[in-house]
Amino acid sequence: MGSGGKRLRPLLMILAARLCGYQGNQDTPLAVVFEYIHAASLLHDDVVDKAEFRRNNPAANTLWGNPAVVLVGDFLYAKSFLMTIGYNSIKILQVLSETTTRMAEGEVLQHIHADDLEIDEDEYLEVINRKTAVLISAACQVGGILGGASEAQEESLRLYGHHLGIAFQLTDDALDFTGKLEELGKPIGNDVQEGKATLPLIHTMHHCSSGEKEQLRRIFSAEKILPKDFERLQQIVLGSGGIDRTIGLAMDHVQRAKDVLDAFAASPTREVMLDIADYVILRRI
């Protein structure tokens, strides 16, 4: 927990609860559940991806090895459900159970499409929905449940989190081609090195020349991508509108997230949630 991070998911859960009028003191402990689940997913992801860095620090698996990291991830998943039982809410447990199931499905889908440059946009969006958006969506929905939201308000919060999560991941995808190590907490081009075809690359494959496609396939399939090859890949992606398409779609989802908050009366909490939606696009770290 001392390695940085935005704590976005617990923050959104607390804000969603308070947007619905919650005034108790049980929102913060429940919000921790979402950080535990998120941390567990990152630990497992780094093992699967053989990652070397996380948040500009050595990844946990490089320090303590895969067995210890997998077990700690399992513990955090189990602990999160144990903590949730104390709220005596089958509905909250159901949301968390469905969420963690879909996250696991997303990881499997991503593994299936590893090194797959032929994945289409819809398939990719389903992967990031399950891997990233579903937990952010659940945090907002559970905050609404805790705050006594109506069914319509609960659905609005779920959709806010969904669109925010998609926009968040798409922005990450763009930054992987345009950002810096200190901004990303991992080397630029990390997704490509790990064989992940993200939206900038997927769009480019459908809008570049046949010669450029062959270059992309050669670079993407290399065991280790050299800096000069990644620079060429960046040129093709930028020239084919891959970054513009990705940021444009992220902005569309940000606007959708903001629009669904119209279901709630104006308030300081609502303004913060609107600002967070803008931050997803404007952030550098």
Image (spheres, rainbow, N blue to C red):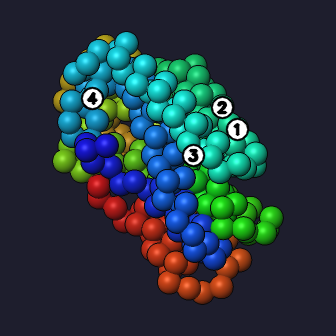
Viewer-proximal residue, 176 or 91? Answer: 91
Spatial separation of the CA atoms under disc 3 and disc 2: 11 Å
Do tag 1 and tag 2 residues touch (Cβ < 8 Å)?
A: yes
Residue bearing mark 1: 98
Q: Which numbered disc, 1 or 4, marks the residue that appears first in the sequence?
A: 4
Residue bearing mark 4: 59
Query: Mark on residue 101?
Result: 2
The local crowd at label 4, few if under 14, some if 14 to 19, many if 20 or more residues have their Cα within 10 Å, is many
Do tag 3 and tag 2 residues touch (Cβ < 8 Å)?
A: no
Relative to 10, say whether 18 is above or below.
Answer: below
Which amino acid is tagged 4?
Ala
User: SS of the residue at dot 4?
Assistant: loop
Which amino acid is tagged 1?
Glu
Can see residue 247? no
Residue bearing mark 3: 135
Spatial separation of the CA atoms under disc 1 and disc 2: 5 Å
Q: Which numbered disc, 3 or 2, marks the residue that appears first in the sequence?
A: 2
User: SS of the residue at dot 2?
Assistant: helix
The image quarter containing residue 72 is: top left
The local crowd at label 1, few if under 14, some if 14 to 19, many if 20 or more residues have their Cα within 10 Å, is some
Q: Position of residue 53 (x, y in %)?
A: 25, 31
Residue at 45% over, 68% down: 276
Q: Which numbered disc, 3 or 1, marks the residue that appears first in the sequence?
A: 1
